Image (cartoon, rainbow, N blue to C red):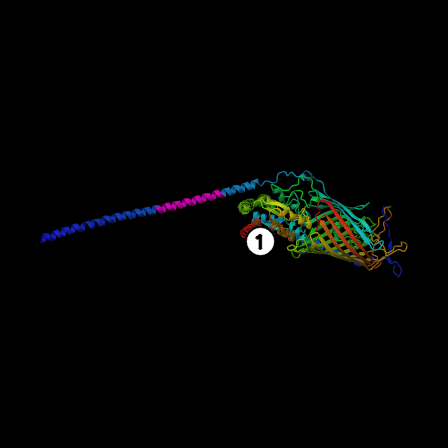
């Protein structure tokens, strides 16, 4: 048993030795009284202010965890909704600071949209609990996990997993918004929920949904056409965030710079990766802007591939304000990089041959 | 002669007459032709017009067809956008359960002290040179029903088991944007009292917290908190608690059990300002008052001011941030002899310079106008424990109030987080009390966490 010592202390007696019993200090009582008054008056002010705070919400207040859903909600809701996003498009959505100001946003929200599949699990739950808003709790009408709208989740683990595999997402890979085709079921899901929350404007949401889906269909065909010549291209990405994009564009992901999700690469792993991909015909090394850029640039150089920093979300770069913009930029950047490489190869062949 | 003239006239007439006749005939034909040509032209024009109209119609029909095809695709897209079918992952068979989230966090520290019997301030600080078990924290957290969630945390040592927190939180929307928490919980006093050991930035607990609050101030109580209807985040908290079983000597239950005034009341005002996207500032004030058990009716008043500033320039360096946390506490305690006056503060500055590394510096101190001195009988060589002791044998507890004197402390640390679930921390500390010898300490701390991903507050 652990020995615990007991200590006794007495206060040094004063020189004029009578232990005078100090009167209950008037000061402490006064301080207490003042503070009590202060708290009570603050309480009264709060009651007063809140009863006069007008709660007339003409617009549906939508808060999205990441900007992708915010941009789609804006398209569907038009001027009947007011949309805000918590995370910025250029920050890593796994690690967002849960600032208390976001609690204020969520407190007034009618609908919260999030990616799900544990992408926001590091920061969103305490914000939702602290928001003091029962409309947006899990299972309520104002809480929409957009991963429940997607037809196919990739990389759902079929065997037992544990964290030795890195920061693994037990429900599957969460980066489904990088397949533009998934924009359609997400838009429909958001429209359906908006119709439930705000049934008066149901026809308005329906009409805007049709516009959005029609336009997205046209754009998808356009992007398909632009990327068609590069089907089957071998690429390397920093994080396993592009699997849905590769699935759509028919790219082959032959390696990742993170040895396991969330684990930064060691120099020996980088060397091994370079060795491995030098034997292949890797065309592109892709990294999001919030990952370290030096390592992927080095790998691309050694492997004879092109290095591209791509945005993974609306707002990931200045000028990307809608879901269409995002893929316009991604597809445009990829096409121009690969087209240049092809020309460079051609011209070098001509020059050499 | 007349006949010749007559014949000449007659023949000239004959010769002139046909051209005149012919001219008439030609003019008619030409007119006819013109008319016909005009008619033809008109017909051609009308035919052209018709052709154009037909082309127009064709184009419109094509467009209609395209639109309809698009709309059909939209319809298809929309109706086929059915929610996900049953996902057949391994975890799906296991994950759906109404059990709470369970997590276990272990904290172990290898310590070296330059003195024998160093001054230990908080219960879970490393005690001796050697390898110390600081704490194993087990948590069970979950949602009870649509009205409440329940979070519980247990602090376990080698042979001790202590309830660190166990409280319910309301989930309903209550008036005034309020929330109620009921149970045994870390009181909302300042900032450091809410931080569990595993989310602290340093191996040891800051001096004023350790001396005035103990390892943690966690009474059993009922807490109301309100979000003020202001444009910035302002939270007011008021709680009424019982001080039974608290580790800190600052508050202890009153012998006079039937006294509402002797309960522990804690108030806190928190403000959060997002000054820029990169810079956030949190300012708060706290006040706690309750009986301190030295004599019926004696109270302790504890005042606190807290500051937290974080600078995180997201655009350029996503994983670099700097934060500063600082608190000042002032305690007044009424006792039989005299009223104790103690105060202390700490300031810690941490710089996260890479995704997995951070380094920091802390300065903390406590000071007093009314130092207490140990009794002669117990020969203590520069060692003192400023906390309530509970002996195993069930002896009477001694309320120990007051500080031995002024104490300054400096610490530098370097932390490496291999992932968010493990941590290695190296810390050097220099402790300089004026009532004992100063000493140095070096700590190497290891921390591991298992289970549900605990989301960290800001």
Identity of the residue drawn at 34% across and 45% down: B43
Does residue B91 show up? yes
Q: Nearer the viewer, residue B195 or A343?
A: A343
Reply yes or no: does residue B65 show up in magenta: yes
User: Could you tell me residue A22's position as x and y percent?
Assistant: 84, 58
Q: Which residues are magenta?
A: B44-66
Q: Nearer the viewer, residue A225 or B40?
A: A225
User: Could you tell me residue B13's position as x and y percent?
Assistant: 16, 51
Instruction: Name the residue beneath numbered marker 1.
Output: A319
User: Could you tell me residue A186's position as x and y percent?
Assistant: 59, 44
- Which chain is home to disc 1? A
Q: Nearer the viewer, residue B289 or A350?
A: A350
Identity of the residue drawn at 14% across and 50% down: B10
Is A119 left or right of B188, judged from the image as shown?
left
- Residue A213, quarter of picture: top right
Identity of the residue drawn at 65% across and 41% down: A156
Q: Of all residues shown, which one is farthest toward the front?
A: A353
Mark 1 lies on a secondary structure that is loop
Q: Residues within 10 Å of mark 1 (few under 14, many from 20)?
A: few
Reply yes or no: does residue B305 show up in magenta: no
State which quarter of the image contains the N terminus of chain B.
bottom left
């Amino acid at each position: 048993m652990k020995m615990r010592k007991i200590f006794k202390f007495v206060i040094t007696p004063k020189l004029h030795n009578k232990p005078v019993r100090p009167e209950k200090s008037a000061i402490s009582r006064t301080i207490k009284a003042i503070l009590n008054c202060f708290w009570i008056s603050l309480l009264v002010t709060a009651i007063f202010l809140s009863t006069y705070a007008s709660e007339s919400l003409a617009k549906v207040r939508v808060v999205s965890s990441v900007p992708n859903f915010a941009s789609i909600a804006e398209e569907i809701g038009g001027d009947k909704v007011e949309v805000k996003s918590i995370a910025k498009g250029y920050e890593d959505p796994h690690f967002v600071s849960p600032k208390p100001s976001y609690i204020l946003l969520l407190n007034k929200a009618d609908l919260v949209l999030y990616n799900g599949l544990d992408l926001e699990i590091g920061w969103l739950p305490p914000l939702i609990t602290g928001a003091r808003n029962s409309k947006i709790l899990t299972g309520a009408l104002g809480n929409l996990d957009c991963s429940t709208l997607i037809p196919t989740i990739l990389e759902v683990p079929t065997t037992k997993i544990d964290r030795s595999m890195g920061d693994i997402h037990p429900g599957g890979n969460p980066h489904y918004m990088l397949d533009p085709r998934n924009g359609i079921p997400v838009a429909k899901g958001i429209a359906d929920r908006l119709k439930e929350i705000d049934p008066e404007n149901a026809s308005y949401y329906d009409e805007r949904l049709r516009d959005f889906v029609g336009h997205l269909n046209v754009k998808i065909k356009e992007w398909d056409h632009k990327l068609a010549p590069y089907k089957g291209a071998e690429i390397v990405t920093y994080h396993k965030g592009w699997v849905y994009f590769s699935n759509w564009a028919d790219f082959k992901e032959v390696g990742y710079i993170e040895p396991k999700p969330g684990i930064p690469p060691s120099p020996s792993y980088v060397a091994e990766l370079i060795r491995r991909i030098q034997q292949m015909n890797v065309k592109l090394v892709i990294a999001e802007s919030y990952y370290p850029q030096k390592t992927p640039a080095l790998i691309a150089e050694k492997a004879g591939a092109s290095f591209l920093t791509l945005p993974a979300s609306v707002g990931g770069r200045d000028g990307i304000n809608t879901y269409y913009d995002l893929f316009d930029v991604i597809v445009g950047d990829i096409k121009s990089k690969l087209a240049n490489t092809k020309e460079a190869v051609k011209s070098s062949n001509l020059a050499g041959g | 002669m007349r006949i010749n003239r007559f014949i000449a006239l007659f023949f000239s007439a004959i010769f002139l007459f046909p051209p005149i006749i012919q001219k008439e005939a030609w003019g008619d034909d030409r007119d006819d032709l013109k008319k016909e040509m005009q008619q033809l032209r008109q017909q051609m024009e009308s035919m052209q017009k018709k052709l154009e109209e037909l082309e127009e119609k064709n184009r419109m029909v094509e467009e209609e067809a395209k639109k309809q095809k698009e709309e059909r695709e939209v319809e298809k897209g929309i109706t086929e956008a059915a929610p996900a079918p049953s996902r057949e992952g391994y975890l799906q068979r296991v994950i759906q359960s109404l059990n709470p989230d369970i997590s276990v966090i272990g904290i172990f520290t290898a310590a070296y002290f330059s003195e024998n019997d160093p001054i230990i301030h908080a219960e879970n600080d490393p005690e001796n040179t050697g390898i110390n078990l600081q704490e194993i924290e087990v948590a069970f957290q979950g949602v009870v029903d649509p009205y409440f969630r329940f979070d519980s945390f247990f602090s376990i040592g080698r042979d001790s088991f202590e309830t660190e927190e166990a409280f319910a939180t309301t989930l309903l929307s209550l008036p005034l944007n309020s929330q109620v928490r009921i149970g045994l919980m870390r009181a909302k006093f300042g900032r450091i009292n809410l931080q569990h050991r595993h989310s602290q930035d340093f191996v040891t607990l800051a001096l004023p917290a350790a001396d005035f609050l103990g390892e943690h101030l966690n009474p059993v109580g009922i807490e109301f908190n309100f979000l003020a209807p202001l444009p910035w985040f302002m939270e007011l908290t008021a709680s009424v608690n019982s001080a039974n079983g608290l580790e800190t000597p600052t508050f202890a239950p009153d012998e006079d059990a039937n006294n509402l005034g002797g309960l522990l009341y804690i108030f806190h005002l928190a403000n959060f300002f997002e000054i820029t996207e990169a810079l956030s500032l949190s300012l708060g004030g706290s006040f706690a008052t309750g009986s301190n058990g030295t004599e019926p009716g004696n109270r302790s008043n504890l005042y606190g001011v807290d500051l937290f500033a974080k600078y995180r320039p997201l655009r350029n360096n996503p994983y670099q941030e700097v934060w500063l946390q600082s608190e000042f506490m002032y305690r007044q305690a009424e006792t039989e002899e005299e009223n104790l006056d103690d105060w202390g503060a700490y300031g810690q500055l941490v710089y996260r310079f890479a995704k997995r590394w951070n380094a920091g510096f802390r300065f903390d101190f406590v000071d007093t106008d009314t130092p207490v001195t140990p009794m002669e009988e117990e020969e203590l060589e520069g060692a003192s424990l400023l906390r309530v002791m509970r002996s195993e044998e069930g002896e009477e507890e001694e309320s120990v109030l007051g500080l031995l004197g002024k104490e300054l402390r400096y610490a530098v640390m370097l932390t490496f987080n291999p992932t968010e679930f493990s941590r290695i921390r190296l810390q050097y500390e220099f402790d300089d009390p004026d009532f004992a010898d100063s000493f140095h300490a070096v700590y190497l701390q290891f921390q591991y966490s298992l289970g549900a991903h605990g989301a960290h507050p800001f």
